[in-house]
Amino acid sequence: MSILLDRGNRVLIQGITGHMGTFFVEDARRYGTQVVAGVSPGREGAEVGGVPVFGSVRAARETTGADTAIVFVPPAAVLGAALEAIEGGCRLVVATADELPVQDAIELRAAARAHSAAFVGPNTPGIISPGKAKLGFMPSFCYGRGPVGVISRSGSLSYECCKRLTLAGIGQSTVIGIGGDPVKGTTAAEALALFHDDPETEALLYLGEIGGSDEDEVAWYAARAEAKPVAALIVGRTAPPGKKMGHAAALIGSRADGHAAKVTLLSDAGVAVAATLTEVIPAMRAALARRPAPAAAYATAPQRS
Amino acid sequence: MSILLDRGNRVLIQGITGHMGTFFVEDARRYGTQVVAGVSPGREGAEVGGVPVFGSVRAARETTGADTAIVFVPPAAVLGAALEAIEGGCRLVVATADELPVQDAIELRAAARAHSAAFVGPNTPGIISPGKAKLGFMPSFCYGRGPVGVISRSGSLSYECCKRLTLAGIGQSTVIGIGGDPVKGTTAAEALALFHDDPETEALLYLGEIGGSDEDEVAWYAARAEAKPVAALIVGRTAPPGKKMGHAAALIGSRADGHAAKVTLLSDAGVAVAATLTEVIPAMRAALARRPAPAAAYATAPQRS
Amino acid sequence: MMMLEYQGKQLLRSAGVNVPDGIVVPRNGRAVEKIADRVEHYPVAVKAQVASGSRGKRGGVLRTETPQAMVACARQLFDTVFGEERPRALLIEPWLAIERELYLSVTVDGRADGYAVIYAPKGGIDIEDGPPPVRYGVGAAQRFRAHELRHALAGAESDYQLREKVVALAQRLVRAAAAHDCTTIEINPLAVLAGGELVAADAKVVRDEWAAFRNEQIRAAREEAKRRAGKLLRGCLDMQHMYVRLDGDIGLISGGAGMTMAAMDMIAEFGGRPACFLDCSPGPTSTRGYRPAFALLDADPQVKVILVSVFGGGTQMQRVANSMKEIMRERKSAKPVVFRLDGTNVDQVPAILGGFGARNHDRLEDAVAEAVRLAKGAR
Amino acid sequence: MMMLEYQGKQLLRSAGVNVPDGIVVPRNGRAVEKIADRVEHYPVAVKAQVASGSRGKRGGVLRTETPQAMVACARQLFDTVFGEERPRALLIEPWLAIERELYLSVTVDGRADGYAVIYAPKGGIDIEDGPPPVRYGVGAAQRFRAHELRHALAGAESDYQLREKVVALAQRLVRAAAAHDCTTIEINPLAVLAGGELVAADAKVVRDEWAAFRNEQIRAAREEAKRRAGKLLRGCLDMQHMYVRLDGDIGLISGGAGMTMAAMDMIAEFGGRPACFLDCSPGPTSTRGYRPAFALLDADPQVKVILVSVFGGGTQMQRVANSMKEIMRERKSAKPVVFRLDGTNVDQVPAILGGFGARNHDRLEDAVAEAVRLAKGAR
């Protein structure tokens, strides 16, 4: 198992005729992702790397049974494209774009909730279930299949950390980039809930940063008696207050936004917290050491890579 | 029977402590309307003419079982008050206010549809089911109970016409002011559908004017084989093009907006059209003369006044 | 409330829409002289800024090639009357090298429960004169869906790259309309330039005056409209009266838009001619409210007789009758006044009117007939 | 993007919010002399217009009673440095007779899936220093419900008439925030005057820079920020780089906000000090993209060594390596550069870097240790 994405997802690419879309066709397919359709209005009838192009999500879905979308269009067009996918019945929609106005993220989140679709993004590399499928532009070689569910506010940081995990022999069930914006298609809390219900996931790694309130949700989860063990890395210890550190949400505006407050909050909730990157693997091992024996935790035996 | 409003409605007044609200308590009750509650935030615990005042629709409904609301608050506050009533579970909400921004009307209409509530207004005197109840500030003496359902875009014009009907011995089942704004809580089409299903209503009088598209809906209804007979008055024969005649929607912007086009449209659909006020009673009589015999028309015998 | 072209274009520009880089020349003798210094490239379009439509057909847009010709055009346009108004300003823009003209508008439409987007592949003309345009009913602004408009446009616009640009622009217009309380944003023509770029060559923006409480621009425009109105009309506008001047001689003081039109129509039916649409119901139905209406019509030489027609619901008619009594007592004009008051508490009216020698007509027909008779006698 | 107080108040005024009737004095020697002519009533507040916070505590707001004192205050404020900036303008406002100070803000809040309204019955201070304020999670702007905010305020604000005014104002603020792509509108203090009127005595408005494509004001403000930046920084901003200057000596050229912070933190952990947060990932990851980053850090005397740390997903690392090769060839500075490239196609990187005598570090730890060592040596 894994969350949201596995070999079964039938993927359509919005903006398939663009640079990113074209690159993704090959890269994702090489990884095992079922790329079944592209959407590019006005270019219907064309093919990109053997993938048929349609003029609308509806046409693509009717012909190919696509149920998952990834959006590679310019920021001003993301709202329209992602709404089309969400309301057109896709159960998972990923929009990687950064530079999306927060108003548009607010609308997309509301639409996804209304249609019971999972929306991942914006400002994220996407989601990958190692050994099964990838839906985004993360570097495939960093990932290995295993028991750790990873949630990250930051793209590159998740590549770095997952490579460290994989080199340390710790595989991942699914790695989800929830993105660095304040309003998220999938929040840390929602990702935690999905991982909690996923039998393959035995422990969690949360990659957070200063600013925002996602860490509150992680702490809230970790403090529950039935929680799976959680490790976390919080970056931004050296970030000055009042300055936006790249991500819209990475800004220390109040005391609770700061590095120390977040580390304390998470530690108090029982999270194995890495205050810097060098401590990630030890923290992860500490969390994994706390997992219950598999027989007690799952009704069915989890699949391992 | 009647539509939307009868003796059963339990009415709450939003803005009961204001000038209009206070006047309405007495006037409506005198007519037989069940006024059970008022809402005036911060004034909870007070009474107006013996009616208890609450701080919210929720509190009013919980204590009094109110299921119908009339909104007498300043235009800037109408959106908030009417949304509270619609989303708070009232099945009928009347907002008489003119000067409501059309954006707010758009939001209210969407909310009413989402909650399956009837919303009447804005820019209307309200609704009256003669001999049963009134929810608005129309002059009671103009109305009498009977078989004609009246739909009007204009307030005073409906008083004038209903007085003429009543003096001519033609009573009304319900008189609904749909209002003079372009976006309406209840459209002509929706009012027609309600009257069509109302056994007491045997014929319809539609009071329209230049501009807008309500008359298209009336013609569309009247042209149906099973339609109840319709009479109509269209005012504005002498209105110049390109000028707003008081109502936001009463503006001749295209050929279809003009008086002649609307009269032709309705006449062609079989409506007995009065081109001016003096022809209303003859037109109404012509329509009533076309009604089928009651036994053929209804499964159950209609109640008559 | 219609904005002048240059104001509408400012609004469009603020919403990220391409508009020509124009110069606004206010109505002011000295300014005309100085225009030439600010224009760098010719030819330019010199455009009269007037609220009335069909400006183009009436010669309100002139193309000029030289500074001298431009100043001459500017003077000429400032001296021209369009409809009933002289230009309040001129807009001088680079003359666009237009490859194609489109039509695009966003407007409040009851059938759509909100906004509708209208598109025609051939712009620059009255949209009613062409084939039926594409209409996409949006509803509330946040209900705009790019793929729905795209689908609607598919049959009418074969150039898919242009179609995408129109979709993106329409999305921006719908958002701007809602954000700025506009009831109409019409771009006609929407110009396609050689590089495929879309530019709003003209702009008609109508704003919702009832949103004045939350929009300073609208509030200021209403104040400005009052300021421009004569003193007498301003008195009426201050009372929220709705006034449209017509060309007849029977001044109508009325209540309710539909009822006012019904009275106008009946005046015509009885052989008379209404001098105005004057709906006094939005303001106070008191002496204070009606006084400016009488002042306006008494001062208008075209008005021969005044017909007061009010059918009150929330308005209590004995109060209206008492206001009439007060106004008649203080009034200087000798123009005859005909009364037809009806509605709540009308039973008290005849006595009050009788108190100052006036008579209330039970039926509108009788009042109108009397007014028409008096107007004919006065000619 | 934070607006200056006077700009924020202009936005509030346009949305129908009461603000004091102020005069803006731009940074300009002559203007200071002329202020006195435009002020009719004293006392006035002379307020430095700076983006940095806690202006009040730093003496950026002065009360003056006379024209002479005002001019003196204006000169003094123009000469004062707040945080890192001198005032770009002054705002002169009538000194308000405040009966009570409240706090009201609307801000984007992930927990609310959109906007949240924050209210505190005691304003004028840092909201964190008081008791927990009232927080109403709105969500999308059109989800604002007056009765929900009213309910939320019931415990904190006992004056029901004031409560209703706060509800009406909050509704306007939420609408304005959405209409104008603001991420925060904070009014602190929100002044209650003797008549019960609410006036925004201060305003902090932050706009969403990603909405620049549909909002000309935001686009213009971004351009203005670039214009104000030095030439070198402007080169980076033109490439969409995100730059925050810090006080260390290790210049960091990095990709990804989180990864950049991780590298900063590791530098500190290893005993070094980062000179900046410089995330180059939003722009082109090409020679064109990285060149201004090197130009900026090479020219900064505080920077002793440059650490290039990029972990690419969509970015192909052989391209980044080739860009580095090109930049190193054309670069004049002798500052040492340490590389740690990883990610897609990293296997091609060592050969390319080796081609110009550089070495790629496999692990960030090694690269950081090397950079810290070099920086210490350079001191």
Image: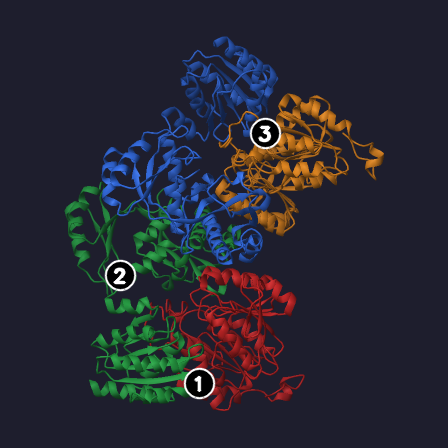
Chain colours: A orange, B red, C green, D blue
On screen, residue B221 versus residue A276, left or right, reads left
Q: Nearer the viewer, residue A67 or B43?
A: B43
Q: Nearer the viewer, residue B174 or D145?
A: D145
Q: Nearer the viewer, residue A119 or A110?
A: A110
Answer above or below: position of C309 versus D45: below
Q: Chain of mark 2?
A: C
Q: Are marks 3 and 2 on the same chain?
A: no
Q: Amino acid at mark 3?
A: His
Q: CA distance from mark 3 to mark 2?
A: 59 Å
Q: Position of residue B65 (x, y in %)?
A: 64, 69
The crowding category of the residue bearing disc 1, from other C-alpha atoms within 10 Å (few below 14, some 14 to 19, many at least 20), is: many
Question: What chain is tagged by disc 1?
Answer: B
Q: Which residue is mark 2?
A: C227
Foreground disc of the pair 3, 1: 3
Answer with left or right where residue B150 lies relative to residue B300.
left
Q: Residue furthest right?
A: A295
SS for callout 3: helix
Circle 1 sits on which residue?
B280
Residue at position x 26%, y 88% in the image: C373
Res B281 visible: yes
Query: Label 3: which residue?
Result: A259
Of badges 1 and 2, the one in the foreground is 2
Q: Quadrant of the N terminus of chain B?
A: bottom right
Residue C17 visible (yes or no): no
